[in-house]
Image (cartoon, rainbow, N blue to C red):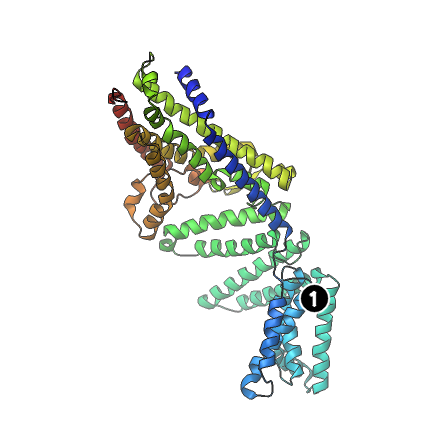
Amino acid sequence: MISLIENELKKIFSKKSIYITLAITLVFIIACNIIYKVNENNSYGYDLSDNIEYYEQQLEALDVDDPEERSIYISYEVELEISKLVQKYGDSSTWQAQVIYETGRSYIEDKVYAKYGEISSNDMQNLSDQVEQNSSEITDQEYLDKIEKEYQDFVAKLDAGDWQYFANEELKQVNKNIEEQQQAKENTQDSTVLSGIEDQLYTFELQKQVLEWRLEKDIPYGYDYFNQCLDQYKVAKVTIRDYENSTTSQQEDYNAKQEYYSALENAAISQYDIEHKTTSGLSSDARGLLLSSCSQFELFIIIMIIMVAGAIVSEEFSRGTIKLLLIKPYKRTTILASKWITCIIMLIIIIVAVMLMQFVAGGIIQGFDKFGTPAVVYDHTTNQIQEINLISYLVMQALGKLPIYIALMTLAFALSTIFTNTALAITIALLGYMGAPFVNAIGLQFNLDWIRYFITPNWDFTQYFFGGLPSFEGITPIFSIVIVLMYMLVMLIPTFMVFKKKNIKNI
């Protein structure tokens, strides 16, 4: 058996096709790392020149003195002023841009409306409060001076690069809102009103946590990874609370439960990265691509192993070398088994080769320091974050994906043996891989319970790792193992039977 496997491996490695496919895979891996590296260095924003040009053209076509066009004219001028102010600090990716969009709009609206003798809806309330407190009217000039001073103070803070000022101001307002809601809660007995107050309190507490993290961990406003973590944490925590406060029947909905599990994971990993200033949830750097090698480069792994399995028997028949193989003192079942085992060995070699290519290419292009952080996962069984050694995590991922690769490899192997047609074996196996997502999507879309008896919802065992929920309700690891083994036997038993009885006299 060992000598047969060695002979098969020599024949495979003597083919140019395997090296060509590996070279194409390497080029793709290098391209992915370069693209992600370039995107990392580029800003997240866009240039405002087109916006400015558009609003200037619109303003030229409108007449501010026309009552029907006045409101549109003023609104366009507001957008123009916002775009110009953002452009002053670069593009839309700067922290100033985010502050301008979220906080500065009110200052600019007040300024533009005042320019045309109008009062914005935002400043209408401010004026009303001021008149009520002072018990006196303010003059038009005082109003204009007030608006201009507030705007200039706002711009001065932007110019000074003092993003912490805006975070602290926002935190003060949030704390004020929390106090108001807590007082309202103490003075309310109505259950419906209390529920609304508690929802508001929870939202403000989340905002407070995010602002405190921003200041403590020195995370300026923006759209980078850490700002994404802050946003993702808020969204995930709201989803978690909504699910936990929902009725039992709503919690039993499988889609809602899957969203809940996903939210738990997102919140925990986002919090971990914020508190440790790490990028464990980032999938686009060298480390992220390595950890997801079996998913990112899955197509290449499958193409290579299908090429090997789809030709390993059929080529023997097409070239007539099968006669030389069968005259050796081995049973036909032993010969065929050695070829199938050779495919398994090649699969392992291919997976390791792809991971090594990503490690080397990713390290050279994006830096080997990226691999210094361990894999971080959320364990649903313990409700805790786990740090896992990179190699251990890669082995786990490869083992979890192995049933997919082996099933498709066996399909190509079976077709190659039964029909002795390489093209047919490779084509059908590839179609099976590409059709799997559509089968699963149809089953989920139309809630087809019988789809779970297909191999495609069961062959990815990574879905069960760390207490995760499978894609289909009702399947379990044991159930999936049984299904995968049954399909494997259905493919292998006829293959061995046909090969054992195959007539080679006319070959």
Q: Is residue 272 visible?
A: no
Considering the image in quadrants, where does the C terminus appear? top left
- The crowding category of the residue bearing disc 1, from other C-alpha atoms within 10 Å (few below 14, some 14 to 19, many at least 20), is few
Q: Looking at numbered disc 1 in the image, what kind of residue is underneath it?
A: Lys
Residue at screen point 58% across, 52% down: 229
Q: Which residue is mark 1?
A: 88
In the image, residue 501 sits, relative to residue 476, either above or below, namely: above
Label 1: which secondary element: helix
In the image, residue 306 sits, relative to residue 86, either above or below, namely: above
Residue at screen point 42% across, 18% down: 7
Q: Is residue 474 visible?
A: yes
Q: How many numbered circles does the render carry?
A: 1
In the image, residue 496 sits, relative to residue 385, either above or below, namely: above
Q: Left or right: where does residue 420 sit relative to residue 47?
A: left
As drawn, the residue found furthest toward the top would be: 329
Picture quadrant where residue 308 is located: top left
In the image, residue 408 sits, relative to residue 96, either above or below, namely: above
Picture quadrant where residue 108 is located: bottom right
Residue at screen point 47% across, 24% down: 14
Q: Left or right: where does residue 243 sit relative to residue 144?
A: left
Residue 312, position in %: x, y? Answer: 37, 26
Residue 478, position in %: x, y? Answer: 35, 34
User: Looking at this view, is 86 or 125 the one in front?
Assistant: 86
User: Looking at this view, is 483 or 173 the one in front?
Assistant: 483
Q: Left or right: where does residue 459 sit relative to residue 42?
A: left
Residue 279, position in %: x, y? Answer: 60, 45
Picture quadrant where residue 482 is located: top left
Residue 427, position in %: x, y? Answer: 35, 38
User: Looking at this view, is 296 or 110 the one in front?
Assistant: 296
Residue at screen point 56% across, 66% down: 181
